[in-house]
C-alpha cells in the first residue's frame, strides 16, 4: 500500500506554492505515494504559474471516504484567504491565518487516519503570530492541537545525517539554565526513536558540548562535567549507541566522515549552521514527537525570491521522500 501523504502549500506570500508545484512535477513523485493536496485553488494555481507547470487537481472530500484518484492529484479544497489578500513577500495576518487553517485540517485528517503523514511548505513564524498563534513555534502549536504531552523537538536531516537539540526557540542567554540531564535524555531518546522509524536499526549518536573545547576540564564552564557527561554515561550504560560530549566545532567532522548517524546539540544554531552549510538546498525538518510523520524543507519562506519563479525544490523533494520512508517504517515499528 502506498503512503498517503497530505501536502499543504505553506505561507502563500512566500515560495511555498511554487515549491509544491515543482514537487508534483518531479520525477517519481506521483508514483511514490497517494497525494492529497489541501489548500485554496488560487494558491495552487499561482504556484503552477510561477513554476511553469500544470497539474490536474481532482476535487475530493477526503473526510467522506476513499479519496485516491488516477490521472491527476486529489485536492481537498479550502477557502482560507482571498486572492487579493495574498501580499507577495510580506508577513501578514491573512497569510498566517491561511496557514493555520490548512495545517489544522491536515492534522485532523492525519489524526483520524485519512492520511499517513503531512508535508508542508515553509511557514513564516511572524505571520503565524500575527494570526494569533501563541506558541513559540509550529511544533508546539501542533502538539497542543493533537494533545501531545511527551517530549518534543524539531529534528533536522541532510543526506542521512540527523540532528536534534536539547533547547530550541529560546534566547541564547537562557540556554545553559535550560539544559538538564532529563532534557538531554529525552533529546537522545527522541532522535534514536525517529532514526529507527526512518529505517536505521541501531543509530549511532554523538552529543555535542555546550562550551568551547567541551569546557576544557571546567576552565570554560562546568555543564559538561556536571550535566552532559553524566547523562551520556547513563544512556550508554543502557546499551544505547551514544557518546560525548564532543566539542561542537569537531563533532560534525565525525558525521561527515560517516562515523555517526545523529548529533544532539545543545541549542538551535549549534546544529543548524553546520547542517545548512553542508547543504542548504537539501535539508529537511522533522517535527519530532508527533504521532505521525510531519516533514518540511529546513529553509524558510524566502521572501527575497518569492514570485520570481526560481525556487529550488531540492529540500521539498527530500521532505516528501523522507515522509514516504517514515510511513513505511512507522508501520513496521
Image (spheres, rainbow, N blue to C red):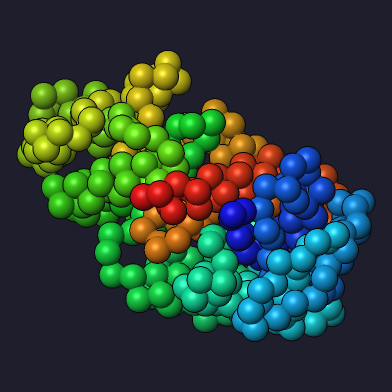
Say which quadrant the N terminus sits in.
bottom right
Residue at horizontal 48 percent and vertical 56 percent from the top: 293
Left or right relative to 50: residue 299 = left
Q: Quadrant of residue 204?
A: top left
Residue at horizontal 75 percent and vertical 77 percent from the top: 60
Residue at horizontal 47 percent and vertical 73 percent from the top: 111
Q: Is residue 161 above or below residue 100?
A: above
Question: Count the marks: how many?
Answer: 0
Q: From the top left corner, tell me how far across and down residue 305 is, in percent.
A: 78, 50
Q: Is residue 297 above or below residue 73?
A: above
Q: From the top left corner, tell me how far across and down residue 250 is, in percent.
A: 35, 21
Q: Nearer the viewer, residue 289 or 330?
A: 330
* Residue 243 visible in the shown view: yes
Q: From the top left corner, tell me how far across and down residue 37 is, in percent.
A: 71, 66
Q: Quadrant of residue 84?
A: bottom right
Residue at horizontal 45 percent and vertical 32 percent from the top: 161
Residue at the extreme front: 1
Q: Quadrant of residue 259?
A: top left
Left or right relative to 271: residue 166 = left
Amino acid at each position: 500500500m502506498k503512503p498517503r501523504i497530505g501536502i499543504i502549500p505553506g505561507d502563500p506570500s512566500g515560495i511555498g506554492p511554487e515549491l509544491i508545484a515543482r514537487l508534483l512535477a518531479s520525477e517519481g513523485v506521483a508514483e511514490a505515494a497517494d497525494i492529497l493536496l489541501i489548500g485554496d485553488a488560487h494558491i495552487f494555481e499561482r504556484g503552477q504559474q510561477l513554476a511553469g507547470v500544470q497539474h490536474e487537481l481532482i476535487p475530493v472530500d477526503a473526510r467522506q471516504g476513499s479519496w485516491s484518484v488516477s490521472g491527476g492529484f486529489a485536492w481537498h479544497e479550502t477557502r482560507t484567504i482571498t486572492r487579493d489578500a495574498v501580499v507577495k513577500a510580506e508577513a501578514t495576518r491573512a497569510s498566517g491565518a491561511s496557514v493555520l487553517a490548512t495545517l489544522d485540517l491536515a492534522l485532523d485528517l492525519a489524526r483520524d487516519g485519512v492520511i499517513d503523514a503531512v508535508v508542508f511548505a515553509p511557514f513564516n513564524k511572524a505571520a503565524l503570530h500575527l494570526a494569533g498563534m501563541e506558541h513559540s513555534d509550529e511544533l508546539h502549536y501542533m502538539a497542543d492541537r493533537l494533545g501531545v504531552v511527551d517530549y518534543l523537538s524539531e529534528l533536522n536531516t541532510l543526506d542521512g545525517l540527523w540532528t536534534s537539540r536539547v533547547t530550541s526557540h529560546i534566547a541564547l542567554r537562557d540556554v545553559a539554565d535550560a539544559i538538564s540531564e532529563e532534557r538531554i535524555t529525552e533529546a537522545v531518546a527522541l532522535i534514536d526513536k525517529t532514526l529507527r522509524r526512518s529505517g536505521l536499526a541501531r543509530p549511532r549518536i554523538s552529543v555535542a558540548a555546550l562550551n568551547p573545547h567541551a569546557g576544557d576540564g571546567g576552565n570554560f564552564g562546568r555543564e559538561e562535567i556536571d550535566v552532559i557527561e553524566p547523562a551520556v554515561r547513563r544512556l550508554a550504560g543502557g546499551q544505547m549507541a551514544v557518546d560525548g560530549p564532543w566539542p561542537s566545532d569537531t563533532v560534525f567532522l565525525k558525521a561527515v566522515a560517516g562515523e555517526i548517524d545523529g548529533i544532539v546539540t545543545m541549542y538551535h544554531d549549534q546544529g543548524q549552521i553546520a547542517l545548512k552549510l553542508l547543504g542548504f538546498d537539501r535539508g529537511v525538518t522533522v517535527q519530532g514527537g508527533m504521532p505521525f510523520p510531519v516533514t518540511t524543507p529546513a529553509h524558510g519562506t524566502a521572501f527575497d525570491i518569492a514570485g520570481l519563479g526560481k525556487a529550488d525544490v531540492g529540500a521539498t523533494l527530500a521532505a516528501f521522500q523522507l515522509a514516504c520512508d517514515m510511513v513505511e517504517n512507522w508501520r513496521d515499528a
